[in-house]
Image (cartoon, rainbow, N blue to C red):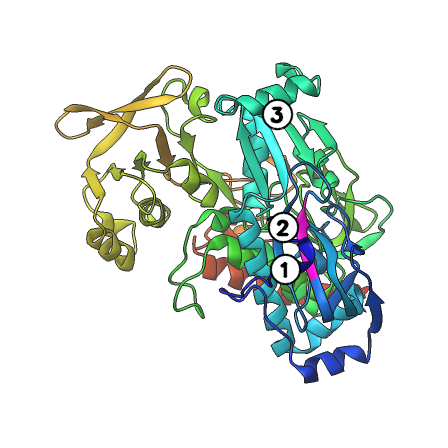
Amino acid sequence: MTRSPATLPETPDLCGAYPRLDEQRIANLSQCGERRPVPPGEVLYREGEPIGEFIVILRGTVAMVEGYRGEEERTIAVHGPGRFLGELGLLTGQAGFLTAVVREAGEILAVGADQVRELVAGDPAFGDLILRAYLTRRSLLIGMDAGFRIIGSRYSPDARRLREFAARNRLPHRWIDVEEDEEAEALLRQLGISPQETPVVIWRGDQVLRNPTVAMLAKAIGLPVPRPGDGVCDLIIVGAGPAGLAASVYGASEGLATIVLDAVAAGGQASTSSRIDNYLGFPSGISGAELAERAVLQAIKFGARLTVPAEACGLEAEDGHYSVLVEDGPAVQGHAVLIATGARYRKLDVPDLEKYESCGVYYAATPFELRMCRQAQVVIVGGGNSAGQAALYLSRNASSVRMLVRGGDLSESMSRYLIDAINRTPGIEIMFHTEVRELLGDGSLRAVRAQNNQTGHPVEIETNALFVFIGADPHTGWLAGAVELDDRGFVTTGSGSSHWEALPLETGRPGVFAAGDARSGSVKRVASAVGEGAMAVRLLHERFSMTGHRQQGR
């Protein structure tokens, strides 16, 4: 006999995703919220729409449902009295990924989203409780393959682009490979979608996007986009890596009208790190993605506006302020600019590399790549911290991990704690003095051909997953002569800028600063990038005091 939806048991809180508020907290929230009765079947908010209220259940039960009233409807969780609803979208302004449906009649307490954001900002204990629950709920949704569907071929660069965008932004989604799923191919035929129109994104069960750009996907799921006519803000931050996020937190918290632009996702290179064990204040470590997510919520709490995706393609000075040109979008004006576009991964110098970049060659080790490597023989190229972190992370799922290191000693480029952890982990083999010469395969990667650079001895290694961590080059091509660069393309600042007497971290243009990996002479560490982002805001105040600029405030 099928259990009636009204009698579904409450989902147990096994990992802190579904805490219960005590009576005192509910009483405090009641002072700024509205109590109202709810009948069974009432929809409190819908999948794909912004969540406008923070809802606490006083009596009855509420189910969180994906694909409500669709063929693939499933209940994700059921909540009873004392629990609160919602997910990260309530704090960030994104659309929700689930529908909240009353199962048993009762009563709810509804508090406006803006009021809750203020409460979170002013009450650290409450803020920590909400943040921890929402971050965990997001992780659970990702692990359950909830959210929108991406349907396409594993060999498609466009499919890879959409999947990377979703993974880097920690957006719940399900990947459906037409090479493996016969039902997916039948669905595409039913929808009248030709192979040339794939990949396809299906959102809310009925919204179909044919080979969308990441900007189209972002708009569909409610991510903020640049808006024309916003006027001149105080600070434009280009790049949402650790330096840019730190500057957004400090800038917005000090009253600067702050806009942050990033082409792909918050977190930069750091967000691709599976675990950062040596970052101050996190003794048990933290993933780069979670660190970025927490920083984004901090910045939003203080009033910064983050826009992803928004790729800067130029910097111009006009009428006493600066204009950052945005590809396929309106320009953004500001009295000051922080260049924090970081660096982009360096590629192997081997033939036909591009052929395998969507089907076997990877430049990050995130949960997305981890799922791709179940029981696979993994090869990692590189001997730095990123390579070491990837080896430890991927060894969880891989049948074996081989690290190909050009030199003969890891201690020259890798932290000691990572070396010790690798030595303790079975299944990780290090091949020193070894370099990749050729990629082998037919459609997808099958093996790599490598060579010992001392003996010349060749070796062929079977693998369908090659991870490349051989350093990065500065992402500064978009500046196109707008500021001075060194001979390697990094932005020169302070005494390194020859045009005038600039402040530390300031370029040859007054009010244009650089921080993090894109800056010449920077220390390539997360902590130093965060420090430079905070320092840039302090120096910006000094520049404003010289120019007489009055900040707008939030």
**Identity of the residue drawn at 62% across and 35% down:** 149
Kindly check if marks 2 and 1 are in contact, taking CB atoms under 8 A apart as contact: yes
Sequence-wise, the earlier of marks 3 and 2 is 2
Amino acid at the residue labelled 3? Pro
Kindly check if marks 3 and 2 are in contact, taking CB atoms under 8 A apart as contact: no
Residue situated furthest right in the rendering: 229
User: Against 236, is 311 above or below?
Assistant: above
Amino acid at the residue labelled 2? Thr
**Identity of the residue drawn at 71% across and 43% down:** 221
Label 1 vs label 3: CA separation?
A: 33 Å
Residue 227 versus residue 532: which sits nearer the camera?
Answer: 227
Residue 329: horizontal and vertical position, in percent?
77, 37
Can you identify the residue that label 1 sits on? 78
Residue 321 versus residue 16: which sits nearer the camera?
Answer: 16
Can you identify the residue that label 2 sits on? 75
Residue 174 appears left or right of 407: right
- Magenta region, main secondary structure: strand
User: Against 316, is 197 above or below?
Assistant: above
Q: Nearer the viewer, mark 1 or mark 3?
A: 1
Q: How dense is the environment of label 1, judged by Cα within 10 Å: few (below 14), some, or many (20 and up)?
A: many
Can you identify the residue that label 3 sits on? 199
Sequence-wise, the earlier of marks 1 and 3 is 1
Residue 201 sits in quarter: top right
Quadrant where the C terminus sits is: bottom right
- Identify the magenta region: 62-66
Residue 553 sits in quarter: bottom right
Label 3 vs label 2: CA separation?
A: 27 Å
Residue 501 visible, this angle = no
Label 2 vs label 1: CA separation?
A: 8 Å
Q: Secondary structure at mark 2?
A: strand
Amino acid at the residue labelled 1? Val
Q: Secondary structure at mark 1?
A: strand
